Amino acid sequence: MTLIDKLMPLLATDFQKAKSLANENTVQNPKSIEAWMFLAYLYNRETDYKNAMDCLKKVIAINPKFAGAHYNMAYIQYLHGDFKTAIKLFNQAIKYESNNITYYCLLASSYHRLGKVFQAIKTYHEALTLKPDHPETFVLPLI
């Protein structure tokens, strides 16, 4: 059982202690993608996006092709309305994990929010082609 497996139940009872132990885990395992991603997850839960971004940048420094870090950075930018940066980062995530429909859906939404309707439609189409029966594709016509 990993430390992160042990910390998950602690999140419900003592979030700050879990975060402190997760921080210690990154000190003890500075090259652990899992440790940095978990700490980023904890910061995201608190909406501490600056620290979450710092953790995600450490993941990318360890493995520049880790799609999950690019996606999470993109999503933070998306939440803040920086759709241009989000598009760049969603595209990076897709470059390294091209079968993840969530990346395409949020990329398409980012294009749509910037008024780039044709690019949004093209990206939505890619998502539908990728996984036509996926639940996320059912909301695409509504956006």
Image: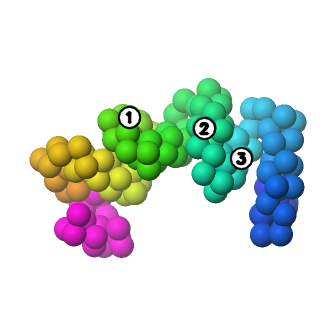
Expressed as whole percent of the image width and height from the top left, the position of residue 75 reads: 46, 48
From mark 3 to mark 2, how far is it between C-alphas? 12 Å
| Amino acid residing under circle 1 | Thr
Mark 3 vs mark 2, foreground winner is: 2
Expressed as whole percent of the image width and height from the top left, the position of residue 50 reads: 60, 38
Q: How many marks?
A: 3
| Amino acid residing under circle 2 | Lys
Q: Name the residue: 74% across, 44% down.
A: 35
**Residue identified by numbered label 1:** 85
- The tag earlier along the polypeptide, 1 or 3, is 3
Q: Which residues are magenta?
A: 126-143
Q: Is residue 48 left or right of residue 95?
A: right
**Residue identified by numbered label 3:** 39
Q: Name the quadrant of the N terminus.
A: bottom right
Q: Name the residue: 86% across, 49% down.
A: 21
Element carrying mark 1: helix
Of 133 and 47, which appears nearest the observer? 47
Q: What secondary structure do most residues of the magenta stretch adopt?
A: helix
Element carrying mark 3: helix
